[in-house]
């Protein structure tokens, strides 16, 4: 049997090792330039940039005309039918085969639901059998379109002009049908697009798409246009992140990259969606704080690179933040949910004199080039990655690279758990710990499942609560449940397993659920797990097993700072929403997109903090856990 | 007296006929047997054949089809008839939906010459182009019901051009994206042809990456081989046709065809001069 001193030394060594591994993991993610690879097009069939782009200023002029006609149409935005009819007539007068698609706005199909409309058009490939298609999506009724300057084009105008161009000039090389769909922004374009896609895929029994019901192909890829009318363009923003961090095949983006290179857009002129504005300030402060802290300890080059990190660092954290939140950054998320590759393209205004101006007609050329490359495909994109992180448009981190920092971060905690578990005796102490941890996990599960029956109940009883009220009730009930568990259930457990020493092994078992949750979810949404580990691993390392009053107080205050309630308050102040609103949003996003925030909060984090609180105040024996 | 001299005359006549016939037989026999000798005789060559193979399919391999069609046209123009050409095209580019010039195949971006037309004869098309059929063509081991147009009916006096193009690597050539023919298979096939006396001389030309490795294993006599690249070298396309959106010809074949455009039937140019011409380009 090892002595107390040697055991303490071992524990200290393990702690130091975990700390070093954690720091190594975090630092590795902060320097993507060292280990990111260059992007390249994997699929030989794509041949991006090998064909000339014939979309010219005449075609662009049509786009500007349509934009202008839209502004002066004289129909209020709320009248979905008339707006859709206007577009339908416009497209038919251009000779395009177009149809209306109606759907009810209200998802509960109640009596007072209103009908909204999408407009879609198809150009069929004459030499092909129509088994595949490429989709271009845009929206109408946008606020930005209402004030478009003369001579500029909105995404609506561009989509219709592109469709007309394809019909006129592209049918000789088309091997796939090209479908454009215009969704009503006023009624919620994401919902409208989703309904259209469901009809297209045959998921809505009664709502078949006219003209396409007997002949429409599998969607190979979709491009969503999010163009702000402008006279100048200096680059593009590309959004790839879909629901819960799902990404399209990297080849879709690589193709677009190559086609943009052909049109003269290079490097940073092609950006991925920016970091959310609210986070940018905090990121800057953290970075400057760190730089000042390390000023005297590090050589000047490293200090300089901390103060002015390369743009890839911002790019990577922006990408990861968008992926962590799990909400699609554009309408392409609708396609992503059915595992169809899609991306959103947005134009970028020149930010200053140093941004080169490109001709606006290049927007059309770039979309044409991408469609032409996608047309060359023989099968769905499958050669390139689905799991990647993009620090910039020419660098990527593959899953085999980015899992390692996360592994390093979780390694310390996991190692400690495993070491304890293999030296464990199966006794009543372990049974007691397991029982306690299980009770809190069950509590977490109840809290997670609670909002759904609440909603059902409220609908059944006719109260018809909206999401916010449901969440308020949910919050109150969860707090009640927590108190009940703590005051009633836990003492019963203590009584049921007699002569068990509380505190022994408890710390080990309480960390197991959260580590398993994080490790398993890292495959679903890596960025979320990365940021969660930044909070969870230090928390697990510092809190638990207090010996004296002072340590107990310190650990309790750390726990208070990191508790779910304080985190919610922190985020609500960052995003300037009130806490109930924030919780409501988290819940609604979970219902819509199945992202990880709500499950993590209920199933992993709340039980973790509760059990940690339990362990802080437990009467400890001499033996360390 | 008259009868005796007449009899002598007839004997002399018969003897002279016998002598003439025997000598003639010898001449005829020696004429036909001259081709058997494995020496590099200038005579004994009576017919020419060509086996032209494109082993890759898909739109982005347009240039391989164009390669073979270019060689086909040149070979036909210089005198080998369709009945003695076996052409294998693994895919149909002319009627591919992505072809803006439907029904036409070009090997130059000036689009002046349509290589596909009504006067071409493709013997093996689509999925018939595979390793098994290719080796059957070379060795002559066919099913009973294979039509004559699909057989290489060469003999010991045939000079055969074997031209292959596609994607390849170290001692292999890829067929149709699913199988490969290796340099050992080719060497074996040519050895079988040698022992069955199916050729007099073979000119083996290959345009693919690491082409020279493909003839590394040849051990039969009278085979001249030329490849477009060495071991560990890639072969590249010559230019991209931006209107079609694909590369239309490979460099090696492009320059070879350019040389042969100046060649007329009955010319006295030699292969050595072709190689010198190529050296000037490289």
Image: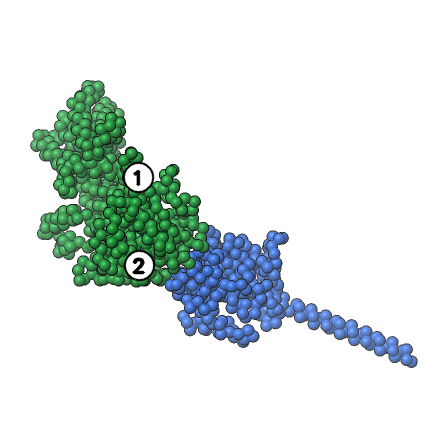
Chain colours: A green, B blue
Q: Which residue is mark 2?
A: A62
Q: Counting residues from the N terminus, which is met first, the one under dot 1 or under dot 2?
A: 2
Secondary element type, mark 1: strand
Q: Position of residue A311 (x, y in %)?
A: 20, 54
Write down the residue under mark 1: A104
Question: For numbered disc 2, what is the local secondary structure?
Answer: helix
* Distance in Å between CA atoms under marks 1 and 2: 32 Å
Chain where mark 1 sits: A
Crowdedness near tag 1: few (<14), some (14–19) or many (≥20) residues, C-alpha within 10 Å: some
What is the chain letter for disc 2?
A
Left or right, residue A502 beside residue A134: left
Q: Residue at x 23, y 62 (%)?
A: A357
Residue at the image position 21 percent from the left and 40 percent from the top: A533
Q: Which of the two residues, A534 or B2, is positioned nearer the viewer here?
A: A534
At x 44%, y 54%, the residue is: A126
What residue do we see at 44% from left, 53% from top?
A128
B183, above or below A143, in the image = below
Q: Nearer the viewer, residue A512 or A296?
A: A512
Q: Position of residue B81 (x, y in %)?
A: 58, 66
**Residue B49, quarter of picture:** bottom right
């Amino acid at each position: 049997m090892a002595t107390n001193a040697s055991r303490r030394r071992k524990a200290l060594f393990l702690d130091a090792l975990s700390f070093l591994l954690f720091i190594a993991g975090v630092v590795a993610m902060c320097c993507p330039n060292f280990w990111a690879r260059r992007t390249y097009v994997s699929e030989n069939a794509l041949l991006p940039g090998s064909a000339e782009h014939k979309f010219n200023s005449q075609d662009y002029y049509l786009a500007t005309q349509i934009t202008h006609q839209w502004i002066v149409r004289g129909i209020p935005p709320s009248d979905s039918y008339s707006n859709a009819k206007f577009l339908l007539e416009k497209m038919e007068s251009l000779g395009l085969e177009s149809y209306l698609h109606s759907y009810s706005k209200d998802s509960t199909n109640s009596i007072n639901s209103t009908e909204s409309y999408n407009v879609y058009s198809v150009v069929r490939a004459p030499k092909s059998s129509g088994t595949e298609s490429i989709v271009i999506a845009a929206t109408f009724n946008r606020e930005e379109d209402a004030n478009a300057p003369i001579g500029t084009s909105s995404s609506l105008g561009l989509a219709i002009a592109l469709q007309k161009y394809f019909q006129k000039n592209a049918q000789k090389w088309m091997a796939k049908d090209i479908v454009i769909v215009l969704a009503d922004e006023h009624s919620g374009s994401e919902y409208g697009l989703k309904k259209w896609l469901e009809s297209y895929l045959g998921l809505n029994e009664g709502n078949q798409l006219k003209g396409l019901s007997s002949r429409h192909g599998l969607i190979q890829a979709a491009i969503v246009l999010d163009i702000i009318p402008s006279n100048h363009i200096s680059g593009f923003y590309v959004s790839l992140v879909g629901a819960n961090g799902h990404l399209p095949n990297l080849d879709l983006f690589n193709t677009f990259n190559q086609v943009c290179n052909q049109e003269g857009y290079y490097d940073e002129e092609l950006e991925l969606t920016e970091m959310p504005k609210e986070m940018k300030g905090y990121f800057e402060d953290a970075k400057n704080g760190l730089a000042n802290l390390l000023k005297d300890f590090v050589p000047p080059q490293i200090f300089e690179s901390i103060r002015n990190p390369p743009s890839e660092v911002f790019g990577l954290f922006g990408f990861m933040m968008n992926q962590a939140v799990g909400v699609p950054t554009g309408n392409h998320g609708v396609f992503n949910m059915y595992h169809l590759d899609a991306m959103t393209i947005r134009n970028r205004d020149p930010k200053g004199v140093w941004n080169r101006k490109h001709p606006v007609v290049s927007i059309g050329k770039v979309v044409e080039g991408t469609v032409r490359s996608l047309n060359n495909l023989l099968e769905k994109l499958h050669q390139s990655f689905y799991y990647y992180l993009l620090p910039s448009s020419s660098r990527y981190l593959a899953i085999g690279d980015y899992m390692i920092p996360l592994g390093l971060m979780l390694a310390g905690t996991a190692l400690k758990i495993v070491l304890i578990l293999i030296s464990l005796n199966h006794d009543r102490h372990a049974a007691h710990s397991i029982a306690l941890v299980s009770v809190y996990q069950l509590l977490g599960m109840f809290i997670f499942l609670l909002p759904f029956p609440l909603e059902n109940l409220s609908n059944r009883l006719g109260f018809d609560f909206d999401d916010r009220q449901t969440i308020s009730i949910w919050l109150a009930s969860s707090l009640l449940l927590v108190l009940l568990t703590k005051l009633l259930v836990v003492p019963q457990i203590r009584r049921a397993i007699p002569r068990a020493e509380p505190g022994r092994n408890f710390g080990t078992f309480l960390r197991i659920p959260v580590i398993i949750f994080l490790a398993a979810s890292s495959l679903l949404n890596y960025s979320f797990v990365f940021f969660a580990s930044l909070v969870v691993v230090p928390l697990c390392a510092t809190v638990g097993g207090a010996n004296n009053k002072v340590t107990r107080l310190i650990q309790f205050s750390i726990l208070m700072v990191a508790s779910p309630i304080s985190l919610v308050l922190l985020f609500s102040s960052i995003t300037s929403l009130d806490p109930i609103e924030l919780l409501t949003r988290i819940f609604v996003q979970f219902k819509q997109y199945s992202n990880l925030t709500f499950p993590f909060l209920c199933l992993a984090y709340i039980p973790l903090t509760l059990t940690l609180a339990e362990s802080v105040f437990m009467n400890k024996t001499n033996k360390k856990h | 007296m008259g009868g005796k001299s007449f009899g002598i005359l007839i004997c002399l006549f018969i003897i002279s006929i016998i002598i003439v016939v025997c000598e003639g037989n010898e001449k005829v026999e020696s004429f036909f047997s001259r081709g058997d000798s494995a020496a590099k005789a200038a005579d004994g060559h009576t017919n020419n054949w060509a086996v032209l193979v494109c082993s890759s399919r898909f739109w982005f391999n347009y240039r391989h089809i164009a390669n073979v069609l270019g060689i086909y046209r040149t070979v036909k123009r210089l005198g080998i008839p369709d009945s003695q050409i076996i052409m294998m095209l693994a895919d149909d580019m002319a009627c591919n939906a992505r072809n803006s010039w439907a029904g036409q195949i070009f090997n130059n971006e000036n689009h002046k010459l349509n290589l596909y037309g009504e006067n071409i004869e493709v013997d093996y098309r689509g999925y018939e182009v595979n390793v098994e059929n290719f080796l059957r063509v070379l060795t002559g081991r066919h099913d009973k019901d294979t039509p004559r147009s699909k057989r290489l009916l060469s003999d010991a006096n045939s000079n055969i051009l074997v031209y292959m193009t596609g994607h390849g690597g170290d001692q292999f050539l890829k067929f149709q994206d699913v199988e490969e023919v290796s340099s050992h298979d080719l060497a074996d096939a040519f050895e079988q042809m040698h022992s069955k006396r199916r050729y007099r001389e073979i000119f083996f030309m290959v345009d693919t990456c690491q082409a020279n490795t493909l003839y590394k294993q040849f051990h039969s006599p009278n085979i001249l081989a030329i490849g477009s690249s060495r071991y560990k070298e890639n072969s590249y396309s010559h230019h991209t046709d931006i209107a079609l959106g694909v590369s239309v010809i490979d460099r090696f074949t492009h320059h070879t065809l350019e040389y042969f455009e100046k060649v007329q039937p009955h010319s006295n140019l030699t292969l050595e001069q072709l190689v010198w011409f190529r050296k000037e380009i490289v």
